[in-house]
Image (spheres, grey):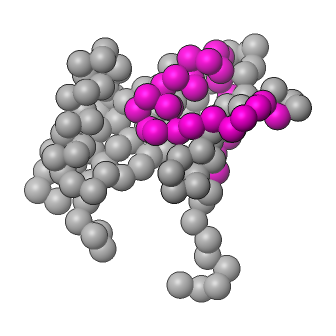
């Protein structure tokens, strides 16, 4: 890998209800909050890998293009299937579901309509 390549380490989202979004990302993606809000009202959440998710509450409607999504991976196909079963049981909105030999993926909507993909594919794919 070239020396300038670095993994993406944070994502900032506009949200309509910060507490609701916080619960969603803590519940389904293992994020935990920092001790306090930033001066501008942004709440930073972190996961075990050190990825930061910034949630900033806005009053205006959030308009998203249909193709917009972001995602994460799970270690096995069965992990993705169990995750899908959990979110379906909890009443989350499933946008898409793939279960192929070399790719298993579920896409769900967060409370503001962002699509989050949880997937597995063989290493090196």
- Residue 5 sits in quarter: bottom right
The reply, left or right, for residue 72 in relation to residue 123 is: right
Residue 105 position, x and y percent, is 27, 44
**The C terminus - image quarter:** bottom left
Residue 30 position, x and y percent, is 46, 39
Q: Is residue 34 above or below residue 61?
A: below
Q: Nearer the viewer, residue 38 or 65?
A: 38
Q: Residue furthest front?
A: 35
As for residue 100 lying within the magenta part, the answer is: no
Residue 92 position, x and y percent, is 35, 20
Q: Residue furthest right?
A: 39
- Residue 7 sits in quarter: bottom right
Q: Residue at x 37, y 30 (%)?
A: 108
Q: Is residue 54 above or below residue 110?
A: below
Q: Count the numbered circles shown.
A: 0
Q: Which residues are magenta?
A: 10-38
As for residue 15 lying within the magenta part, the answer is: yes
The reply, left or right, for residue 31 in relation to residue 123 is: right
Q: Residue furthest left?
A: 101
Q: Is residue 66 visible?
A: no
The reply, left or right, for residue 8 in relation to residue 89 is: right
Q: Is residue 93 visible?
A: yes
Q: Residue at x 36, y 52 (%)?
A: 73
Residue 15 position, x and y percent, is 65, 23
Q: Residue at x 88, y 32 (%)?
A: 39
Q: Is residue 91 above or below residue 28?
A: above
Q: Residue at x 51, y 56 (%)?
A: 49
């Amino acid at each position: 890998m070239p020396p300038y390549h670095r993994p993406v380490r944070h994502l900032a989202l506009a949200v309509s209800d910060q507490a609701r979004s916080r619960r969603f990302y803590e519940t389904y993606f293992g994020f935990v909050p920092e001790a306090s809000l930033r001066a501008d009202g942004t709440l930073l959440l972190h996961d075990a890998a050190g990825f930061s998710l910034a949630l900033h509450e806005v009053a205006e409607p959030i308009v998203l293009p249909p193709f917009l999504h972001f995602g994460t991976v799970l270690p096995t196909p069965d992990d993705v299937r169990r995750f899908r079963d959990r979110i379906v049981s909890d009443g989350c909105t499933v946008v898409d579901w793939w279960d192929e030999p070399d790719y298993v993926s579920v896409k769900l909507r967060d409370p503001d309509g962002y699509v989050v993909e949880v997937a597995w594919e063989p290493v090196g794919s």
